[in-house]
Image (cartoon, rainbow, N blue to C red):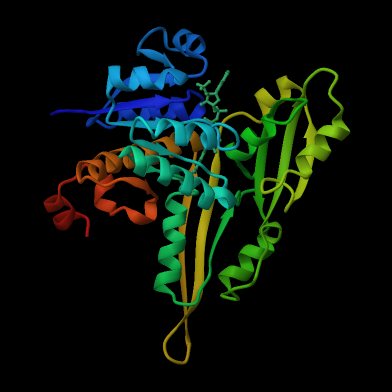
Amino acid sequence: MKKNRVMIAGFGNVGRGVMASIRNNPDMELVGIASRSPERVKKELKDAFPVYKLSDVSAWSREVSPDVVILCGGSKADLPQQGPELCKYVNTVDSFDNHSRIPEYFKAMDDAARSSGHVSVISTGWDPGIFSLERVLGNSFIPGARAYGFYGLGPAGGLSMGHSDALRTIKGVKDARQYTHAIPEAVDRVRRGENPALTPGDMHSRECFVVLEPGADPAEVTKAIVSMPGYFEPYDTTVNFVSQEELDTVYKGFPHDGVVITAGKTGADGAHSALAEYRCAWGSNPEATANVLVAHARAVIRLAAEGRKGAFTILDIPASYFSTLSREELLKHWM
Ligand SMILES: NC(=O)c1ccc[n+]([C@@H]2O[C@H](COP(=O)([O-])OP(=O)(O)OC[C@H]3O[C@@H](n4cnc5c(N)ncnc54)[C@H](OP(=O)(O)O)[C@@H]3O)[C@@H](O)[C@H]2O)c1
């Protein structure tokens, strides 16, 4: 079997998850890694794979000729710059997760991918990604119902990597983790079918655990966090300062969970309740996100083989394009 040639651009938690996921997908082959810090990656991987300098894309894209590159940079500062640049040279897939900025990111990627003749699937993972699809399905199948996403349903909450990444870009922050908590009263109202008009801050609160750089001012850092537009400003945000040791031992790992709930009524007189829930609980958010990215990498290759160009999201792709199963198998066993 000819394997799909996949590269990883950006090697952090999601990048490591993609490397592991490729091993679990026999139709995929990792042919190289591009990074802004190739020496760090080479050291970690002990030269198991070729590592290239990210900015040398014009050279490595010709030398390696990957079918698709999985972009694993951070959403806040890396992908808005790297995505439109890389998709001039290669087909890409990424997990850009700054929801309020998806329309502008889509446009930048669509313009660059169309004019270079590539396919770029953007903003996939579990949310945005599979939860985006579930929101659209819920709203389509229960007309008039809103679809709500809640995260961090348990007492510990769920670790948001995008928000942790955003915290680490703030001056004075050495390291940080952000836990999202669903507000239980809001979940109950949605499940009762009230279809309430909830603001983001009505649904979740945010809890930050921050290690300061030596000499950083905690008040300044707190102000920068709670006023960060999109990420923290709309929420009730708590900032806790901890030592690096405490962060590494107490707040380790990447657990996350969430549910998309759509509730409404059916029938001409709306007599019957209708409730659809789609739940994910991940022991490792980056590994789960990586699995979704790798399945979308398969879809990118299929779209490109059809001669398609431009940016796509999970909403635009048939589910069969994610699967290794044949049409016959899908029709026989999975319908
Ligand atoms: N859609 C979803 O459901 C979903 C879910 C989870 C995460 N995400 C997104 O995925 C993004 C990446 O998450 P992540 O946890 O992989 O971020 P991360 O570990 O901070 O890595 C981000 C980038 O930072 C660089 N980096 C990582 N470790 C480094 C180190 N020790 N020294 C220097 N540079 C380092 C790497 O780029 P270089 O190799 O180029 O240096 C890497 O690509 C997040 O921003 C989030 O937006 C999306």
- For the C terminus, the image quarter is bottom left
- Location of residue 230 with respect to 66 vertically, above or below: below
- Which residue corresponds to the image point at 47% horizontal and 25% vertical from the top-left? 10
Q: Residue furthest front?
A: 115
Name the one closer to the observer, 316 or 81: 81
Q: Position of residue 144 (x, y in %)?
A: 49, 77
**In this image, 288 relative to 329: left or right?**
right
Residue 266 visible in the shown view: yes
Residue 284 visible in the shown view: no
Q: Quadrant of residue 45?
A: top left
**In this image, 172 relative to 107: left or right?**
right
Q: Quadrant of residue 92?
A: top left
Name the one closer to the observer, 131 or 278: 131
**In this image, 178 relative to 39: left or right?**
right
The mark tally for this picture is 0
Q: Position of residue 324 (x, y in %)?
A: 21, 41
- Which residue corresponds to the image point at 39% horizontal and 32% vertical from the top-left? 70
- Which residue corresponds to the image point at 46% horizontal and 45% vertical from the top-left? 123
Q: Position of residue 201 (x, y in %)?
A: 71, 57
